[in-house]
Amino acid sequence: MRIKICGITRYEDARTAANLGADALGFIFYSKSPRYISPTNAAEITKKLPPFVSRVGVFVDEDPQRVLDVARIAGIDTIQLHGSETPEYCASIPLPVIKVFSIRDNFDVSIIQAYKNVNVAGILLDTWDSERRGGSGNTFDWSVAIKVCDKSDKVILSGGLGPSNIREAIDTVRPYAVDVNSGVEISPGVKSPYKMRDVITIVKKMGQVD
């Protein structure tokens, strides 16, 4: 079971997450996010990280060349697309792509098939919010995630996950990985080392059982 800690803005949080066993760290380059980090500031963090920790850049409906420019500057190795990017857009990115789908009532899971056909590296399911792109702190109907998992082994579960519900989420959905953001925060962009410890410990122990 893999875990990504997203919304990293400080090196001390990145270092703690990596030392605790996080498999990936997420850096948000969407300027409207309260967890936005500049490419140069992200680079100061990524260059100090140990090997085998994935550096994920989060973008929303950004120009593809801008995505690649930011990834180069920031030391990003995986791209997470959180907007309305098309399958063709995903296929044009020469780095592993995680495509995000915001889940609300009556979400049509069949739309994901077109993205599987372009071989995206991961499918991330998050909670739809009318004002925010992720980091809402709210969960969604996990029965939708179960349906997606039945058709794909690349599903990353996100949306309102934290120490209090991560075990139930994994037991219920059985995803490939989980993505945690606001559920381990003190304030937007500032992580709690204790919450990160608790959630990563749970995830890793559950992975050992599997």
Image (spheres, rainbow, N blue to C red):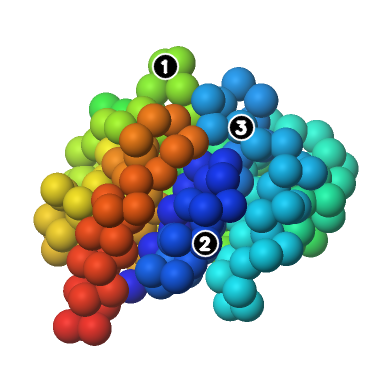
Q: Is residue 32 left or right of residue 186?
A: right
| Viewer-closest of 138 and 114 | 138
For the residue marked with disc 3, what is the amino acid? Tyr
Q: What is the distance, in whole Å, between disc 2 and disc 1 at their CAs? A: 33 Å
Which tag, 3 or 1, sits closer to the chain's start?
3
| Residue 186 placement: quadrant | top left
For the question of whether residue 30 can be seen, the reply is: yes
Q: What is the distance, in whole Å, between disc 3 and disc 2 at their CAs? A: 18 Å
| Residue 141 placement: quadrant | top left
Residue visible at 57% across and 42% down in the picture: 9
**Mark 3 Cα shell of 10 Å, populated few (<14), some (14-19), many (≥20):** some
Give the percent coordinates (x, y) of residue 34.
53, 25
Q: Mark 3 points at which residue?
A: 36
Which tag, 2 or 1, sits closer to the chain's start?
2
Q: In which quarter of the image is the C terminus?
A: bottom left
- The dot on residue 3 is none
Q: In this view, does 104 lie to the left or right of 48?
A: left
Residue visible at 52% across and 53% down in the picture: 12
